[in-house]
Image (tube, grey):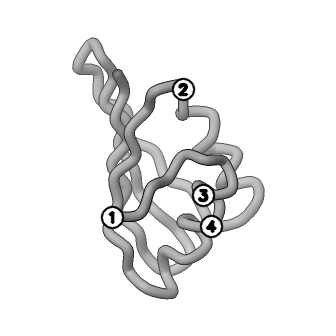
Amino acid sequence: MNIIGIDVSQGESHATLITKDAEEIAFKFKHNKSGFQILNSYIKPGTIIIFETTGVYSAQLTTYLKNKKECSSY
């Protein structure tokens, strides 16, 4: 199982992928179509994505992931 932790900021997020082999890969992406394509390249089936909902800063990310069915709200 892979886990992606995301630190959401205004317009850009910093993320770390932790693979099932405990490998850590850091990357960043902008909150636009090409940025979300970068994020998507790290998402595999069963990937857990963790981030703090930070109001307007995380709204685009939340919408993108919900549309992909990758995000649950708790």
Labels 4 and 3 touching (C-beta < 8 A): yes
Of residues 55 and 14, the one drawn nearer to the viewer in this rendering: 55
Mark 4 lies on residue = 63
| Relative vertical location of residue 32 with respect to residue 40 in this rendering, above or below | below
Residue at the farthest right position: 33
Disc 1 and disc 3: Cα gap in Å? Answer: 13 Å
Q: Nearer the viewer, mark 1 or mark 2?
A: 1
Whole-number angstrom distance, CA of label 2 to CA of label 3: 15 Å
Amino acid type, residue under disc 4 in the picture: Thr
Estimate the spatial distance between the alpha carbons at disc 1 and disc 2, rounded to whole Å.
Answer: 22 Å
Q: Nearer the viewer, residue 72 or 65?
A: 72
Looking at the rendered structure, the kind of residue marked 3 is Lys
Q: Tell me which corner region of the image, top left, top right, bottom left or bottom right, holds residue 39.
A: top right
Mark 2 packing: few (<14 Cα in 10 Å), some, or many (20+)? few
For the residues labelled 4 and 2, the Cα–Cα distance comes to 18 Å
The residue most toward the bottom is 56
Q: Nearer the viewer, mark 1 or mark 3?
A: 1
- Residue underneath mark 1: 74
Task: Establish if 44 lies above or below 12.
Answer: above
How far, Cα to Cα, is label 4 from label 1? 15 Å
Name the residue: 66% across, 53% down.
36
**Secondary structure under the numbered disc 1 in the rendered image:** loop
Residue sitting at 38 percent across and 39 percent down?
48
* Percent of width and height locating residue 14: 41, 57
Q: Kindly identify the amino acid type of the residue bearing the numbered disc 1.
A: Tyr
Front disc: 4 or 1? 1
Tell me the number on the disc at residue 66.
3
Tag 2 residue: 44
Horizontal side of 38 relative to 26 (left or right) equals right
